[in-house]
Image (spheres, rainbow, N blue to C red):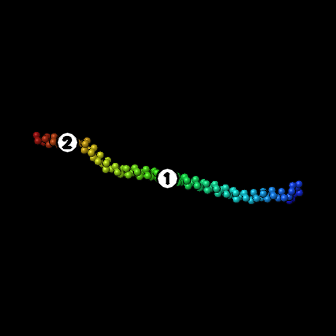
Amino acid sequence: MAFPTSVNDQITDAVTQSNVKVLGEAPAVALGSLYQSMAHSTGILFENAVSAQQQQNTLTQAATNMGVIQIYSVDTMAGAAGTEKVSQAGVADNLTSLLTVLNSFRR
């Protein structure tokens, strides 16, 4: 010790050694804390990536489902459109119009 004190030298040595130990371990503890924080942040990053991927898969399945529904409804829509054209145009009306035009040429 540099200065003589009324405290026992063994006590001051123990306190000094404790302080040196704390100062010596401080960088390791700081790096350990930093590594834990980085590991936690990386874990959250991967959790968010997995969540985004799951949401993207859900959207992809929904889009695929809508595409399949549209593909399967093509024949039905074509049949409905054809039926609508025939029913609205009216074959009987067309024949009647044709007969009227032909009769007009007879006179």
Q: Looking at numbered disc 1 in the image, what kind of residue is underneath it?
A: Gln
- How far from the left and from the top, in percent, is residue 21? 76, 59
CA gap between label 2 and label 1 equals 58 Å
Q: Say which quarter of the image contains residue 101.
A: top left
Looking at the image, is mark 2 or mark 1 nearer the viewer?
1
User: Given the image, on which type of amino acid does mark 2 rest?
Assistant: Ala
Residue 17, image x, y percentages? 79, 59
Q: Give the camera-side residue of 52 and 96.
A: 52
Residue under pointer 2: 92
Q: Secondary structure at mark 1?
A: helix
In-image side of 80 versus 28 (left or right): left
Residue pictured at 21% horizontal, 43% vertical: 91
In the image shown, does 25 or 81 lie closer to the viewer?
Answer: 25
For label 2, the SS is helix
Quadrant location of the N terminus? bottom right
Look at 50% across and 53% down and name the residue there.
53
The answer to whether residue 75 is left or right of residue 25 is: left
User: Camera-side residue: 89 or 20?
Assistant: 20
Q: Write down the residue under mark 1.
A: 54
| Image x and y of residue 88, in percent | 25, 41
Q: Residues within 10 Å of mark 1 (few under 14, many from 20)?
A: few
Q: Residue at x 44, y 52 (%)?
A: 60
Using the image, determine if residue 26 lies above or below residue 100. below
51 sits left or right of 27 in the view: left
- Name the image quarter holding residue 28: bottom right
Q: Point out the image quarter for the C terminus.
A: top left
The reply to whether residue 101 is in sight is no
